[in-house]
Image (spheres, rainbow, N blue to C red):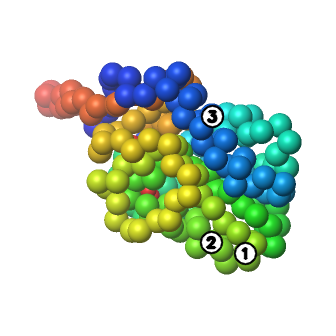
């Protein structure tokens, strides 16, 4: 099964406006407080970069990243999350904002929230750009949310299929296409 990029679901201006709104909510929430924004690589890379740049200039924010593997080259959640790169920061006693690209089944975020809570931060909040509520399998608490989207596979603005299309400035729907079956060579 292969995928091709189809229509734009959320264009770059709409994304930008929403990230600005989220940044102002986040900025208000942490006003006067130091916090660490933790971006989940690689999908949240552009969202995280824009979100922290749109924060009020007097925000006391530090950034760190974690890399997890979820789907591999497929588009189905396995529920198995592997930490590929851990944090450089000791989050014990600190205010933490977890920043993720998309909430789908919820398995990845609930795993990460549990893992980070185990490290005894003072507070843990979560910010996601996209939410596919129809696909939820576990309950996940999210404090800041961008867009609810239908159950479609999306790429762009950091989201990939098999490593590609993260660079697209808009968020697109990607559709499965039939790949021609390999012909078997007739025996001589
Ligand atoms: P969950 O564990 O909530 O099912 O999945 C979260 C992860 O699955 C996201 O971080 C993302 O990597 C991937 N994912 C879920 N839905 C999509 C989608 O529509 N497009 C892409 N590119 N990745 C998705």
Q: Do the CB atoms of the residues marked 1 and 2 lie less than 8 Å apart?
A: yes
Name the residue rendered at 60%, 42% in the picture. 22
User: Badge 2, how many Cα within 10 Å: few under 14, some, many 20+?
Assistant: few
Q: CA distance from mark 1 to mark 2?
A: 7 Å
- Mark 2 lies on a secondary structure that is helix
Can you see residue 20?
Answer: yes
Task: Please give the residue where the numbered disc 2 appears in the rendered image.
Answer: 115
Q: Which residue is identified by label 1?
A: 119
Q: Position of residue 115 (x, y in %)?
A: 62, 72
**Could you give the CA–CA distance between mark 3 and mark 1, rounded to whole angstroms?**
30 Å
Q: Nearer the viewer's eye, disc 3 or disc 1?
A: 3
Q: Earlier in the sequence, mark 3 or mark 1?
A: 3
Q: Is residue 80 left or right of residue 36?
A: left
Q: Residue at x 72, y 47 (%)?
A: 27
Q: How far is disc 3 from disc 2 in space, using C-alphas?
A: 29 Å
Q: Secondary structure at mark 1?
A: loop
Instruction: Please provide percent x and percent y for residue 135.
Output: 31, 55
- Which residue, given by chain and number where applicable, does mark 3 sit on? 20
Rendered residue at 39%/68% (across/down): 138
Q: Quadrant of residue 4?
A: top left
Side of 180 relative to 119 (left or right) = left
Of the 4 image quadrants, the one containing the N terminus is top left
């Amino acid at each position: 099964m292969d995928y091709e990029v189809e229509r734009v679901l959320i264009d770059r201006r709409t994304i930008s406006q929403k990230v600005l709104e989220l940044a102002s909510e986040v900025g208000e929430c942490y006003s006067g407080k130091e916090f660490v924004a933790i971006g989940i690589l690689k999908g949240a890379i552009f969202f995280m970069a824009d979100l922290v740049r749109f924060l009020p200039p007097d925000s006391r924010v530090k950034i760190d990243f974690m890399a997890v593997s979820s789907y591999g080259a497929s588009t189905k959640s396995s529920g198995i999350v592997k930490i590929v790169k851990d944090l450089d920061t000791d989050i014990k006693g600190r205010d933490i904002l977890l920043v993720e690209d998309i909430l789908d089944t919820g398995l990845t975020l609930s795993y990460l929230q549990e893992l980070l809570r185990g490290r005894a931060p003072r507070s843990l909040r979560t910010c996601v750009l996209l939410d596919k509520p129809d696909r939820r399998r576990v309950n996940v608490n999210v404090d800041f949310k961008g867009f609810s989207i239908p159950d479609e596979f999306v790429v762009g603005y950091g989201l990939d299929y098999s490593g590609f299309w993260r660079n697209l400035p808009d968020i697109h729907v990607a559709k499965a296409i039939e790949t021609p079956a390999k012909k078997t060579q007739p025996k001589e």
